[in-house]
């Protein structure tokens, strides 16, 4: 599968710019205004995350062909700015670092809620961990809002609207996910999955605004980010069910895309069998895997992925950027989908 070729004559390699964003994240976490214990934990926590990212980068690339930085929200934001020929200056680099901090705060909140704190944060009492996540969120907000200072007044207002609206959508998705209430259909489950990953389209839209795009054009980049997030979430949900020794989602009672797809087509006996097996975890995991796969639910999730993949390519075409950096997201979509099925017309 050939990768798109593009030229960035006015920008250093994006990999080095993303690395600079990550260095800025670390500097913010090493803030002397913080309590010494928390400051040390933040730095160690970030170093562990970066080491894991580096292992993935060294193992190659996303899906074996694409640069590893493409999976980061900082990389996505810079990719959008570069696609529009915008200036990647200090304000943009700080904002991209802010997006990483924002996601880091949401990830930490998630880990607290799922009782899955890891590494340097693992022994923190819940109230202390919540406070730490709030501090990360404040750092992210500060870095993102500093970007407004270099924008025209209309775009300043739009930046704030984007941040607030997409943050509320993310909160809505997280709330519904944490309630562990089964969505009534696969389409509703997909919408919920997109909502809880709303930080991804937010980073894309902020990048477009930083490059001076009008709201309609910025919205196309956000749409690419939103559909890319859904594609990744489909892969994550399938990986949780089929790629791990234990399914965290099953253990915590969450209704992921393949589980909602199974439930929607199962008769009363099939639903009863699923609930019986779910009650007998972890020993029944293989039985659940077989039940879900044989029902055709995985195939239904593949249809959701394919619609998202096609939408990504359509939006890239609408932008007129088929030969620009953003085309990497089309290639990423193709390769992500190809892990499960053969995408039609993938390049």
Image (cartoon, grey):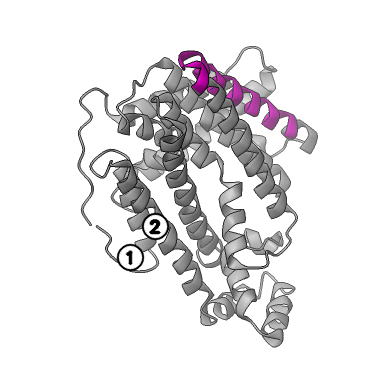
Q: Position of residue 47 (x, y in %)?
A: 51, 31
**Mark 1 vs 2: CB contact within 8 A:** yes
Near mark 1 (Cα within 10 A), the count class, few <14, some 14-19 or many ≥20, is: some
Toward which corner of the image does residue 306 lie, by quadrant? bottom left
Left or right of residue 201, residue 287 in this image: right
Name above or below for residue 225 compared with residue 21: below
Q: Position of residue 263 (x, y in %)?
A: 64, 75
Dot 2: element: helix
Q: From which residue to which does the magenta span run?
A: 130-154
| Residue in front for this viewpoint, 67 or 268 | 268
Q: Position of residue 208 (x, y in %)?
A: 42, 31
Which residue is identified by label 1?
Answer: 343
Residue drawn at (72%, 34%) of the image: 129
Q: Is residue 89 magenta?
A: no
Q: Do we see residue 194 in this rendering? A: yes
Toward which corner of the image does residue 46 lie, by quadrant? top right
| Residue in front for this viewpoint, 345 or 98 | 345
Helix, strand or loop for the magenta stretch, by majority: helix
Name above or below for residue 241 compared with residue 78: below
Which residue is identified by label 2?
Answer: 309
Name above or below for residue 192 compared with residue 30: below
Residue drawn at (21%, 38%) of the image: 6
Dot 1: element: loop
Toward which corner of the image does residue 307 lie, by quadrant? bottom left
Count how many numbered circles sit on residues in the image: 2
Quadrant of the image containing the N terminus: bottom left
Left or right of residue 170, residue 9 in this image: left
């Amino acid at each position: 599968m050939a990768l798109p070729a593009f030229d960035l004559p006015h920008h250093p390699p994006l990999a080095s710019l993303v690395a600079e964003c990550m260095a800025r994240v670390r500097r913010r976490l090493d803030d002397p205004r913080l309590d010494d214990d928390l400051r040390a934990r933040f730095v160690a926590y970030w170093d562990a995350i970066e080491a894991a990212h580096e292992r993935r980068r060294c193992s190659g690339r996303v899906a074996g062909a694409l640069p590893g930085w493409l999976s980061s929200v900082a990389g996505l934001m810079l990719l959008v700015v570069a696609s529009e020929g915008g200036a990647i200056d200090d304000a943009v680099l700080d904002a991209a670092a802010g997006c990483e901090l924002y996601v880091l705060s949401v990830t930490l909140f998630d880990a607290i809620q799922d009782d899955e704190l890891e590494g340097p944060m693992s022994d923190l009492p819940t109230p202390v961990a919540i406070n730490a996540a709030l501090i990360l969120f404040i750092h992210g907000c500060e870095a993102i809002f500093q970007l407004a200072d270099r924008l025209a007044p209309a775009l300043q207002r739009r930046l704030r609207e984007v941040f607030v609206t997409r943050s509320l959508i993310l909160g809505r998705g997280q709330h519904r996910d944490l309630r562990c209430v089964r969505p009534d259909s696969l389409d509703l489950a997909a919408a919920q999955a997109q909502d809880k990953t709303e930080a991804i389209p937010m980073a894309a839209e902020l990048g477009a605004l930083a490059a001076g795009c009008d709201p309609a054009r910025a919205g196309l980049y956000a749409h690419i980010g939103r559909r890319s997030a859904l594609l990744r979430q489909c892969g994550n949900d399938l990986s949780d069910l089929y790629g791990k020794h234990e399914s965290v989602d099953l253990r915590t009672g969450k209704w992921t895309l393949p589980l909602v797809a199974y439930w929607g087509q199962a008769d009363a006996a099939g639903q009863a069998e699923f609930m019986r097996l779910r009650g007998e975890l972890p020993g029944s995991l293989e039985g659940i895997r077989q039940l879900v796969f044989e029902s055709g639910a995985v195939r239904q999730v593949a249809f959701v992925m394919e619609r998202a993949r096609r939408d990504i390519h359509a939006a890239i075409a609408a932008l007129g950027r088929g030969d620009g950096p953003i085309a990497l997201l089309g290639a990423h979509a193709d390769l992500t989908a190809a892990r499960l099925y053969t995408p039609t017309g993938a390049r």
